[in-house]
Image (tube, rainbow, N blue to C red):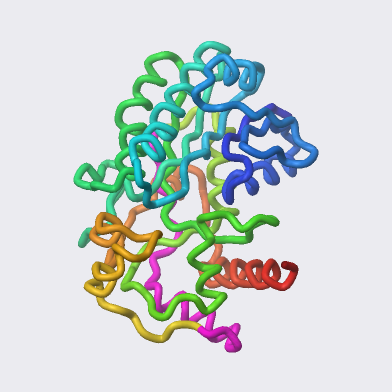
Amino acid sequence: MSKCYAVTGANGHLGRHLVALLLQRGHRVRTLARQPLAGQDHRIVHVEDVDGLCCALDGVDGVFHTAAPTQMTASNPEIEIRRPIVDGTRNIINAAVQVGVPKIVYTSTAATVGLRQAIPLDESYFNTTSRHPQFRAKLEVEQQLAPMAESKGVRFLSVCPPSVLGPSLGRLTPSLKPYAQLVNGELPFLPPMRFHLLDVRDEAEAQLALMETDVVQHSRYILAGHYVDLRQVVQQIRQHFPILRLPRWTAPKAVFYLLAPFVPELNLTLVRECIGCDQRLDGSRVEREFALHWRPWQHTVLDTIEDLLLARTLR
């Protein structure tokens, strides 16, 4: 049966894929983003405007809350990162309560589970030691605002994706910027990293499954995807796109500590917590309960690079 869903951050990497998937499945979509999507029922509403949010969410059957600051560094983390994430989500919840929206699927991050561990971590783990403002803010949403929503009658499901790749659907989003730099030959060396990689199309499918299922057993789900070494990813790209100038050297973590004061995308907290990470996740809960399968990571990487090369050609 066709339903109406709201998607915040509809211009983002995940948001665009969610909108496309919802329309493909015959649902009506109400998009909330800073810039309108062509042909959509679009509302431009600031997350601080609860009355505006109430009008935008009135009559929808659920909210996919994907909107969040994408920058990993900020001169004022409280204003630029924490408030939009925490206060914005609180306002979404309050608006949902006022107009009777029954369910919110919230896009958190696997960083709230953990970034370095010897064993795969499941949904029972929370990364309470992080000093990174984005990770801390999303953890605050999961631990404080999710129970608040549930107590007010709104089902609140947190989705924890790792690094997400996949086609951009026409717009180079900030999450793909490191790979655009890779394609453009702007990275002289690689950071040492082992992490989980997820296809954005699989994430959209998983979030829709969570939204459409009436009785969901849990309130937190890791979308683990595949465990990879960044060197594997680059080698896969090199094999299929030998013309690209790709880095062959992996720099030690100490190099990134030295670079942090001079590179806008880096800071000491980001280097300490993410560079050299060995992230291991257990995503069996969502795979088991919803019979989900992730497409091979090699396909995801190649689709991403092809999309970036096409975008570069069309510029």
Residue 52 included in the magenta stretch of the image:
no
Residue nearest the viewer, comparing 9 with 258: 258
Residue 278 seen in the figure: no
Image location of residue 85, percent across then percent down: 42, 35
Image location of residue 9, percent across then percent down: 57, 39
Residue nearest the viewer, comparing 241 with 105: 241
Residue nearest the viewer, comparing 246 with 241: 246
**Looking at the image, is 296 positioned above or below residue 205?**
below
Taking the image as shown, residue 93 lies to the left or right of residue 59, namely: left
Residue 243 included in the magenta stretch of the image:
yes
**Looking at the image, is 261 positioned above or below residue 31?**
below
The residue most toward the bottom is 242
Quadrant in which the N terminus is drawn = top right
**Looking at the image, is 233 positioned above or below residue 56?**
below
The residue most toward the top is 98
Quadrant in which the C terminus is drawn = bottom right
Taking the image as shown, residue 78 lies to the left or right of residue 312, namely: left
Q: Quadrant of residue 197?
A: bottom left
Image location of residue 30, percent across then percent down: 68, 30
Identify the residue at horizontal 57%, vertical 14% (top origin). 51
Identify the residue at horizontal 25%, vertical 58% (top origin). 268
Residue 160 seen in the figure: yes
Q: Quadrant of residue 84?
A: top left
Q: Quadrant of residue 311?
A: bottom right
Image location of residue 226, percent across then percent down: 43, 63
Magenta region: which residues?
219-245
Identify the residue at horizontal 33%, vertical 65% (top origin). 262
